[in-house]
Image (cartoon, coloured by chain):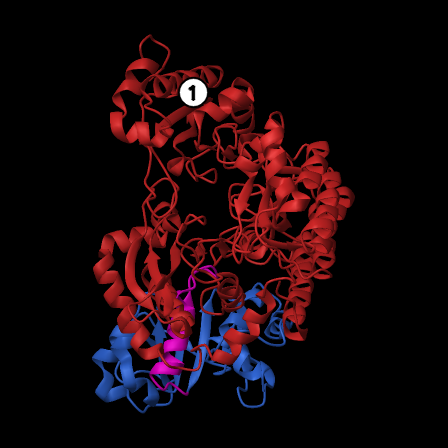
Chain colours: A red, B blue
Amino acid sequence: MYIYDDYDQALVDQRVAQFADQTNRFLAGELTGEEFRPLRLQNGLYIQRHAPMLRVAIPYGHLRADQVRKLAAIARTYDRSYAHFTTRQNIQYNWPKLEDVPAILAELATVQMHAIQTSGNCIRNTTTDQFAGVAFDEIVDPRPWCEIIRQWSTFHPEFAHLPRKFKIAVSGSVGDRAATLVHDIGLHAVRNAAGEVGFKVLVGGGLGRTPIIGSVIRDFLEPHHLLTYLDAILRVYNRYGRRDNKYKARIKILVKAMTPESFAAKVEAEWAFLKDGPATLTQAEIDRVSQFFTAPAYETLPGDDAGFVQLQAENKAFARFVERNVFKHKQPGYVAVTLSLKKTGVAPGDATADQLDAVADLADQYAYGELRVSHEQNLILADVKQSDVAALWESAKALGLATPNIGLLTDIIACPGGDFCDLANAKSIPIAEGVQKLFDNLDDLFDLGELDLNISGCMNSCGHHHVGNIGILGVDKNGSEWYQISLGGRQGYEASLGKVIGPSFAQDDVPGVIRQVIDVFVEQREGDERFIDVFDRVGIEPFKARVYQKERAHG
Amino acid sequence: MVKTPHVIKLDRQTGEIEVTANHWLRLAEASDDPVPAHSLLPLAEWLERKDELIGRDDVGIWFKPDDEPETLGADAANVAIIAVEFPAFTDGRGFSIGRLLRERYGFAGELRAVGDVFKDTLLYLRRCGFDAFEVRADKDVHEAAKGLHDFSDAYQTSAEQPLPLFRRRSA
């Protein structure tokens, strides 16, 4: 895990002082609400439906146990003893007081955390694979590159006020677990013909009201050119991205308008001036940052642990937990364990202060004091000995964090929705709960196999509904809340966008409609096909026919 | 009558700061002959009259956010003052204009930020090569000047610091 030096710490401390000054000037009337708004957003502070909301960065989803305890302490002191993990590896507090925010930031700074650029029209938190560094299919550990990008993007003088928000995701593996195709910039680690590692660069992906899959603008970028190339992309976007209409201001609109080929040519022309300049990464810097992400002191184990294997044969509940929540590790005898924040009846991604403290203890006990957050809003202990999984499972069960549903229908990605968010057209949390209740029987849930269901409360798509196998979008119709359902979306390198099934539904009807969609899937399914396989084979029509067989929908 | 804003001037060598009255006027068009002293002309107009104006140290250029530094090119080296307009402080195009003028086109004169300019963007502007700041008339100019010192260092390369932190950190 990266450890701040005096330079890093000074910047975070000085940001706390700067934000305290901005808050004081706003409260004293020296800054208008309109002026303060972009300034506070650049520090993750929204004024929401009920109270301010503060979004704290978890750079590339990594946390130390002491940081988790600090997050818990902040939740108790300044909020209502819980917090919400987001789809971009951040954490949000829903009830802080505006005047308390400088104090919260000061507390975060003591554990090398901050809320810098977690919102606003700037470069946001860089996200990556929650299994970075331990995944069996990894080409390169993406974390040093994420940290290098974090430093480059923090207070970048030229890109502080972009046309719109800007999100970068990095994948270092064969499989993409970071939704890189739907980011403003997606970086994929690849090997060239000579076996050297570099990045494939995609731009212009994104969700929101105009969902687009990113386009490749460079097949292979040598790693030491990463920052000058990013500078070139951002400069083209900063200068030519639309600023007259916020709905057309994302880079995806510029890339589409120019065509990816012309955009790539413009970037290359700009890069020609920057390439090999002083911002070119040095091997010394790559090494300096990489040394923070070395493997922990693993025990040398012969392979799979006998007790771990045996308990799976004897105990169905444990076997289910292993099947869904345990991920293959590159180190023999170790696994990565996902703690589910998707228990039925709890808002997806929410954790209480007590749970956070307990998870910090589990991280200390079983996982070298570190944990990760996934963009699916779960927590991961990345380095657990197989022989410890049973004990960890028992502890996690007692905490309500062992629901064996990772990748299944009830592992729902959802935004906070209309219960909290000012932007939302409709609620998300009760919809998630309604669906979870309907599929609460584990046998049934397991039989259905892998299925992503994602819910967004509005077109901003924080709940990634476009890339859910089943997507649910809250829409406003004459002041009442309705839900549009789409099918066939998926994430990963094969990412594609779901197709809207038809007219939207009232809140009470949504679980029933999902039931019908699942019924069609089960009837059409051959063998162990996944939902998405069936959808690809039979298309949307059978689902449409069932769902609209009687008049339920309203225009 | 709009109150004339004060200007914060930064000595890029010594870092010294001075607050002065503004002497420069932005002219939407200068049909008069000759162009009066202390005029800032829109880029297109300056380019039209380049032969007459180049080398005059009492006439400068006024960039709008969609003006392209490329159209001025290397002539930037022979201009005494360029003002870049920020219609809103959240319009960051002027940051790129500043860096391009300084780092690519050899502009060494006064680079002045005008428009929606106040404390909270001054340091970004400074790092993009600006050394004069026409602070909005309704803001306290001395308070604004403190914004130039919000941070003691920065990670990136910039017009002010050509070496990124990682090249200085290991030194």
Residue B45 occupies which quadrant of the picture?
bottom left
As for residue A81 lying within the magenta part, the answer is no
Provide residue A10's location: percent of width, then percent of height: 67, 71
Count how many numbered circles sit on residues in the image: 1
- Which residues lie in the magenta part? B83-108
Q: Report the residue at 28% width, 15% height from top.
A: A545
What residue is disc 1 on? A514
Q: Is residue B116 above or below residue A165?
A: below
Left or right: A60 as drawn, with respect to A186: right
Relative depth, front residue between A71 and A340: A340
Q: Could you tell me if residue A257 is visible in this image?
A: yes
Q: Report the residue at 56% width, 28% height from top.
A: A429
Neighbours of disc 1 within 10 Å: few (<14), some (14-19), many (20+): some
Element at badge 1?
helix
Provide residue A222's location: percent of width, then percent of height: 36, 72
Q: What amino acid type should be assigned to the residue bearing mark 1?
A: Ile
Left or right: B28 as drawn, with respect to A175: left
Relative depth, front residue between A244 and A227: A227
Q: Is residue A65 above or below residue A519?
A: below
Provide residue A280's location: percent of width, then percent of height: 42, 78
Q: Could you tell me if residue B39 is visible in this image?
A: no
Provide residue A389's location: percent of width, then percent of height: 65, 42
Q: Is residue A6 above or below residue A545?
A: below
Q: Is residue A416 above or below residue A266?
A: above
Relative depth, front residue between A473 and A332: A332
Left or right: A295 as drawn, with respect to A230: right
Most extreme residue toward the top is A550
